[in-house]
Image (tube, rainbow, N blue to C red):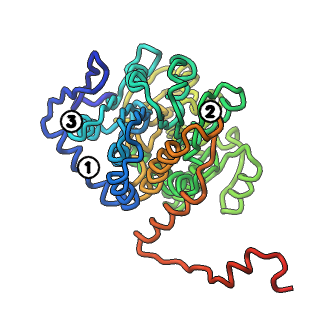
Amino acid sequence: MATKTATAKVTAAKTTVKGDFKDASLKEKGIARIEWAERDMPVLRAIKKRFEKEQPLKGYTMACCLHVTSETANLVRTLKAGGAKVHLCASNPLSTQDDVAAALSLEYGVPTYAIKGEDSEGEKSTYYKHLMAVLDEKPNLTMDDGADLVTVVLTKRKELAANVIGSMEETTTGIIRLRAMEKDKVLKFPVIAVNDANCKHMFDNRYGTGQSTIDGIIRATNVLLAGKTVVVSGYGWCGRGFATRAKGLGANVIVCEVDPLRAIEAVMDGFHVTTIEHAATKGDVFCTLTGNKHVIDTHHFEKMKDGAIVANSGHFNVELNLEGLAKIAKSRRQVREYVEEFTLKDGRKIYVLGEGRLINLASAEGHPASVMDMSFAVQALASEYAVKNKGKLDVRVHQLPKEIDQWVAKLKLETMGHKIDVLTAEQEKYMASWNEGT
């Protein structure tokens, strides 16, 4: 489902992307879109202003594999303001906003390798070529949504590993992959788990994913959620955000989990908890948010009611076994943009959204800028932290220092017009002692 408004060509030198844009207004549309998002990103603006003066990333080349959206564009502009030479490619074939890619390439001077709907299967695909294009710049820092860049460096481009001083990872899926690399002792440079920062997962994953996933499902289908049974697979921060918002729209929500603690939490949050095996016969709308493979498998599809809608909001499209679904279907067709109808042998129809990819970015615009303000502020400061601590960090997955998290939260709160109390000297002394009050 590639858009027809823009295509992109990687030059032979692979140092930039030349936009072959038929619509002359595409760049201007992207600029306006980026500026609109920037209005709701005051913390990132403050960091950008400081970066322009201090140039903490000067002399460093960054390869970024991220969702190419207006919010990401403001992160990239901040990194560039800090002196970095930034090269950007898409982390998902359906999440790119072509007008934003055009603006980044042609207005802001950031080589951007991304086309909405680009093919992504195999090493000859456009997606893979774009990964290679940013890695050809021999980066000192990498920034990932899903750990694809790190994976390619460690498997296909091993000669680059010695040049990388650090990497930033922003997704739960990516952190899972990276911790597996650390466990298997194949990781070659330190990684900062940006996703695990409180200012990221508590707000981006919960409120951002919750709202944008609802947005994506409704934009793709125009379905009324009130009165529907919505099945949520996974009750991490993303799952609980989506479940809460579905409930708020009047849906009857069923949660499927493998972790007993999260399952208890879902029960105490007022949701019915059961297995996907049981829920498969009950749901009108299904959404996976786990980071795992074949969460909804072939035999689950076989049990679904006629007209069931199935979506994924986990990073990779493997959460739904679409190959299995295709095998049990007698026909398939596109019925709406981002909606594919699979007709089973008995005539039941199942509707898959956005090719099983991140529905909040495939058919919608991703998270609102105001919540990405915190996530991308953390990303920018994590990059600065990696540079300041060059050669000092062990080769493993690191947590972001608490003081960075706290600074971002404090500034965000101030920009929202709220104030909090400050401990008195007496209170600080009391909290630091063990024998006060006895």
> Image quarter for residue 67?
top left
Return the mark for residue 33: 1
In this view of the protein, which residue sits in the foreground, 331 or 359? 359
Quarter of the picture holding the N terminus? top left
Q: Mark 2 points at which residue?
A: 177
Label 3–label 1 contact, CB within 8 A:
no
> Is 138 situated above or below 200?
above
Residue 42: percent from left, percent from top: 36, 61
Q: Alpha-carbon neighbours of circle 2 within 10 Å: few (<14), some, or many (≥20)?
A: some
Amino acid at the residue labelled 2 = Arg
Nearer mark to the viewer, of 3 and 1: 3
Comes first in the chain, label 2 or label 3: 3
Q: Residue 285, how many percent across, how many down?
A: 53, 45
Residue in the image at 84% along x and 80% along y: 435
Residue 225 is at least partly visible in this image: no
Q: Is residue 263 visible?
A: yes
Residue 45 position in % (x across, y down): 35, 57
Sequence-first disc among 3 and 1: 1
Q: Residues within 10 Å of mark 3 (few under 14, many from 20)?
A: some
Contact? badges 1 and 2 (CB < 8 Å): no
Q: Residue at x 70, y 38 (%)?
A: 277
